[in-house]
Amino acid sequence: MKRCIIVQGPTYSNSISQIRECWKGYDIIYSTWAGTEGLYTKDEIVIYSPLPSTPGTYNMNYQKMSTIAGLELAKSMGYDRALKWRSDMWVKNPQGLFDKFTHGYNTLFWYQNGGYLSDYWMEDTIDNLLTLWDVVPEGHHPPERILTDRLIELGWLDKVNLLVGELNEDVDIFWNTRYGAYWLHRLNDEIEYKNNI
């Protein structure tokens, strides 16, 4: 198995250094937007995509296009699995997180109130992720719902591995969200996420 991390999305100056530090020693591809070339070093693998003319519902077209660009580059470089990761998150103990993965579709949680899987990050074969992202990024539903519906359509629910309950102070993910940054193991205290099935 040859796996890479695809850091997908806009480049955040208040996150990029932590992302570099946490994934040091791992194979990383940054998939971001044209115009941010000066924020990366010559040693980093970066694909700069033009910003799509339409954002899609809840910016899903942006997410789709930069995700597919990163996955296609990874596949052309010989990788067969990928962890698609938000560009405003970093991990404490990445190997500890990888050790919790299965050979199926790895993601964070099932949101009980909305009835969908999270899209913060996802890990699977590159071919499966490309198939999953073959969606129309428009409509009335948020990206999480669109991707969950696609996953159900593909018959993959039985291969989903949810990891929110596995997070703790030793293996954790920090989300540098504009709504208030926090460690994601805290989601296990909230009824919408705990005891995920």
Image (cartoon, helix red, strand yellow):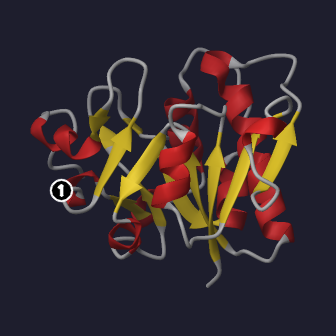
In this picture, residue 136 sits left or right of residue 50: left
- Asked if residue 134 can be seen in this view, the reply is no
Q: Nearer the viewer, residue 151 or 3?
A: 3
Q: How many residues crowd around disc 1 within 10 Å: few (fewer than 14), some, or many (20 or more)?
A: some
Horizontal and vertical percent position of residue 117: 41, 42
Q: Residue at x 89, y 30 (%)?
A: 50
Q: Nearer the viewer, residue 67 or 116?
A: 67
In this picture, residue 118 sits left or right of residue 100: right
Horizontal and vertical percent position of residue 142: 53, 23
Horizontal and vertical percent position of residue 104: 48, 70
The amino acid at mark 1 is: Asn
The residue furthest bottom is: 1
Q: Secondary structure at mark 1?
A: loop
Q: Residue at x 59, y 14 (%)?
A: 140
In this rendering, the count of numbered labels is: 1
Q: Which residue is mark 1?
A: 168
Q: Nearer the viewer, residue 182 or 133?
A: 182
Q: Where 96 sits versus 138, above or below? A: below
Q: Residue at x 44, y 56 (%)?
A: 157
- Asked if residue 41 can be seen in this view, the reply is yes
In this picture, residue 49 sits left or right of residue 162: right
Q: Residue at x 51, y 31 (%)?
A: 14
Q: Residue 187: name its quadrant.
A: top left
Horizontal and vertical percent position of residue 7: 62, 49
Quarter containing the N terminus: bottom right
